[in-house]
Image (tube, rainbow, N blue to C red):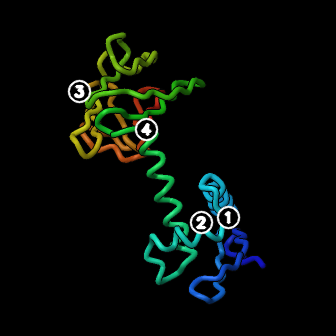
Amino acid sequence: MLLVGVGVIMPKRSIKLDGKTTSLFLEDTFWRELECRATAEGETWPNYLRQLLEETDSTGNRSASVKEALMASLRDDYDRLCGDPGSQSCWLVEQGEERRREVLGGTAITVGSSRGNSIVLRDPQVAPKHLILTFDGERWWVADLNTVQGTRLNGHPVQVAPVPRRGEISLGSCHIIRV
């Protein structure tokens, strides 16, 4: 059976929980992730799902609880891969057609067109020392170093501002995205 929402098809699967048959509606992506994680743990998807629901507050909508638990697991996995934000940070650098990932250590990252920067950009609109990214122990900040060209965060001009995850910093024709 399928539940059809606004352009989304969600397959239904049933499982016995607490002696009662319960139906769950999840998008295919969530079912695939659930099956992948179950296989990695050497479990069947129903057993893995039971364990997952035991670890969450699933008194309400169980489909939503499963999605929240899977998303939390994915975020934890991602954070583990990228490391402690104070010791390493991941940035996607886009410069014309070139895209590269920079994994940098430390709590201060300099960006500009001169070779002494942590991230070097070859763009005539980027100043030799254009901006600095700093980590204060809780979050990343961007600070424009009083450039004529300026710096934008998510399309808005900034002097100093916190950088959210997936925040896009633009300078010249280049973009730096916190991942």
Mark 3 highlights which residue? 146
For disc 4, the marked residue is 82
Quarter occupied by the N terminus:
bottom right
**Sequence-earlier tag: 4 or 3:** 4
Q: Are marks 1 and 2 in contact (CB under 8 Å)?
A: yes
Mark 4 in CB contact with mark 1 (< 8 angstroms): no
| Amino acid type assigned to the residue bearing label 2 in the image | Tyr
- Above or below, 115 against 39 in this view is above
Q: Specify the amino acid type for callout 4.
A: Cys
Q: Distance from label 2 to label 3 (Cα)?
A: 54 Å
| Element under disc 2 | helix
Q: Residue at x 32, y 12 (%)?
A: 116
Q: Earlier in the sequence, mark 2 or mark 3?
A: 2
User: Nearer the N terminus, badge 4 or badge 1?
Assistant: 1
Q: Nearer the viewer, mark 1 or mark 3?
A: 1
Mark nearest the camera among 2 and 4 is: 2
Residue 161 location in percent, x, y? 27, 43
- Residue found at x 43% / y 26%: 172
Q: CA distance from mark 2 to mark 4?
A: 26 Å
Residue 44's tag is 1
Q: How far from the left and from the top, in percent, is residue 121?
A: 43, 19
Q: Nearer the viewer, mark 2 or mark 3?
A: 2
Question: On the image, which quarter does residue 141 sit in?
Answer: top left
Quadrant for the C terminus in the image? top left
Residue 66 numbered mark, or none: none
Q: Is residue 152 above or below residue 113?
A: below
Amino acid found under the numbered disc labelled 1 = Thr
Distance from Cα at disc 4 to Cα at disc 3: 31 Å
Question: Circle 2 sits on which residue?
Answer: 48
